[in-house]
Image: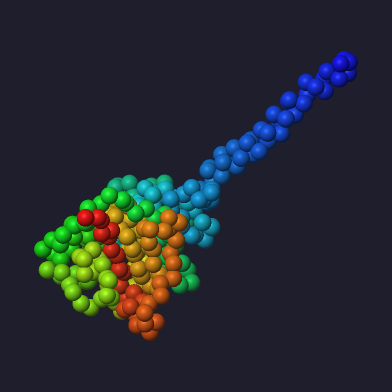
Amino acid sequence: MTADQRPEVRRRPFLLVFLLLVPVLLLGFVLVNGLSDRSTSLLGLSECTVETSKGDVGLSREEAQRATTTAALLARGSSFADIDSIDGAAGIDEAVMQRLIEGPPDDAGPSLSCRGTATDGLEEEPLTPSGLTPRAEKLRDAMSEVFGESSLGGFAPGGVSSGHGAESTHYDGRAIDVFFRPVTEENRRQGWILSQWLVAHAGDYNIQYVIFDDKFWSAHLSRGQWHNYDAPDPENEILRHLDHVHVDVLRGEN
């Protein structure tokens, strides 16, 4: 081996290592810069996403809960000063709050979606005197605390046995209907404020489905997007859930 050959032999391992490191370094650069940009959801890492005028903004579950609760309290007439005192919208992107409060500019509809997480190992629950299971009662009480007095239906003392589809979760005492009547643009926007609060808090209350305004969200779908809801009668605004938000909780197992 000559002296002229030795440097080339020594360079080959370095060149190989360099070529192997380039993709790793590039990925690290993308990760660092991507995670610092709150307007992107890198590789789907964000638990929740809000569509805003600035583009999609990724939120953690806790941020989505604070943001949707803030929107709900403002809709009830609270001031930002009151909400700041309970650490409501602190640190949440202004465009996110504007979209959650006002809804899409062209037509009422969903702006927030969160990943679905259906909890395993829950026990099946019997009806309480209200006609709801304990899980559904807990959800009803939480909605009342945030949204105040609402027009509720879909359950009754002793349970319900008619008025819904053949396999409706209403018959199990696991479902609540929250009415926004009549069907107007403003009532639809109010219904979406509730619907998005439910999605953000789905894990806390073991929520399974949210249905409203021709759309549904499911805890069983990990991507957590809103999907078109095909009503059995497209002419019936009740079956299309245009006048009420339907929410139900997981059954559990025997």
Q: Quadrant of residue 170?
A: bottom left
Image color mode: rainbow
Q: Quadrant of the C terminus?
A: bottom left
Q: Residue 114: tell me if it is visible.
A: no
> Where the N terminus falls, by quadrant?
top right
Q: Is residue 27 above or below residue 15?
A: below
Q: Is residue 248 left or right of residue 47?
A: left
Single out the residue that lies furthest toward the bottom.
235
Question: Nearest the camera: 97 or 199?
Answer: 199
**Residue shown at 20%/65% (left/top)?**
173
Q: Residue at x 78, y 20 (%)?
A: 10
Image coordinates for residue 240, horizontal then vertical, percent = 36, 77
Determine which quarter of the picture holds residue 129: bottom left
Residue 112: x %, y % from top left: 43, 59
Task: Count up the numbered dots.
Answer: 0
Q: Residue at x 34, y 54 (%)?
A: 118
Q: In this rendering, is residue 253 above or below 32? A: below
Q: Find residue 253 and report its horizontal and vertical position in percent.
A: 24, 55
Asked which quadrant contains residue 190, the reply is: bottom left
Location of residue 131 in the rendering, given as x and y in whole percent from the top left corner: 15, 66
Give the residue at x 48% y 72%: 106
Q: Nearer the viewer, residue 245 or 22?
A: 22
- Left or right of 7, for residue 151: left
